[in-house]
Amino acid sequence: MAKPSFQCLGTSIDVPNVQALAASIANPADVPPRYVRPEAKADPVVSDGDSELPVIDFSRLLHHRFSREESAKLHHACADWGFFQLINHGVPDQAMENMKADIVEFFKLPLEEKKASAQLPNSLEGYGQTFVVSDDQKLDWADMLYLITRPLHSRNIDLWPAQPLTFRDSLSCYSMELKTVAGDRR
């Protein structure tokens, strides 16, 4: 079997795990300054009464009669919101439910199990903070799980969590379904 070739995405400066950091802080005033974002209070993402999250119907995008109208909605969602909810995309409910359940179970694991299960030193893939390029960079108050699933030759399943036991199969199945939605021919 051919060894996968991996695209170099750079490296990330090692920073403390947010879950461990949060457990060590008794007083909210002791949160390290790089995690504090006073501008977030001044500029909320959504306020009461704002527009609803844009919903794009994939089946209408593909239908000759409705595609122009749905494409205009998609353009508005991308230009004004930067994201949207996609419905009628054809991804089986079971694939989505399995993926959601495995993600929930992964994040319930004890910190050490998460770190051991899904992290390799000097890799952007894995669990924790990624894309940290300077000691002055503001950080999100959240750890993440970042994995490359497509294209297949960039996939490194060794970095995918081994727990829960169904995680790797669920993610592989889910990513194949998303490939179909995206129309990826690779």
Image: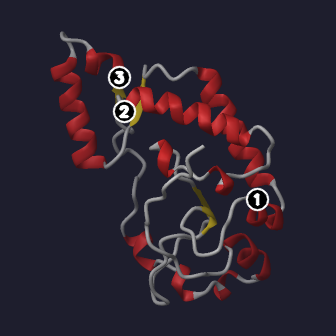
Q: Secondary structure at mark 2?
A: loop
Q: Which mark is residue 57?
A: 3
Give the residue type at disc 2. Asp
Which of the two labelled residues, at mark 1 and mark 2, occupies the earlier sequence position? Answer: 1
The C terminus, quarter of image: top left
Give the Cα distance between marks 2 and 3.
Answer: 19 Å
- The extreme front residue here reads 1
Q: Quadrant of residue 129?
A: bottom right
As drawn, the label of residue 117 is: 1
Picture quarter containing residue 57? top left
| Residue at 52% over, 45% down | 149
- C-alpha separation, residue under disc 1 versus residue under disc 3: 37 Å
Crowd rating for badge 1 (residues with CA inside 10 Å; few <14, some 14–19, many 20+): many
Indicate the quadrant where residue 128 lies: bottom right
* Contact, mark 1 vs mark 3 (Cβ under 8 Å): no
Residue 184 is labelled as 2
Mark 1–mark 2 contact, CB under 8 Å?
A: no
Q: Residue 32 in the image: state x and y as whole percent.
A: 60, 87
Secondary structure found at label 3: strand
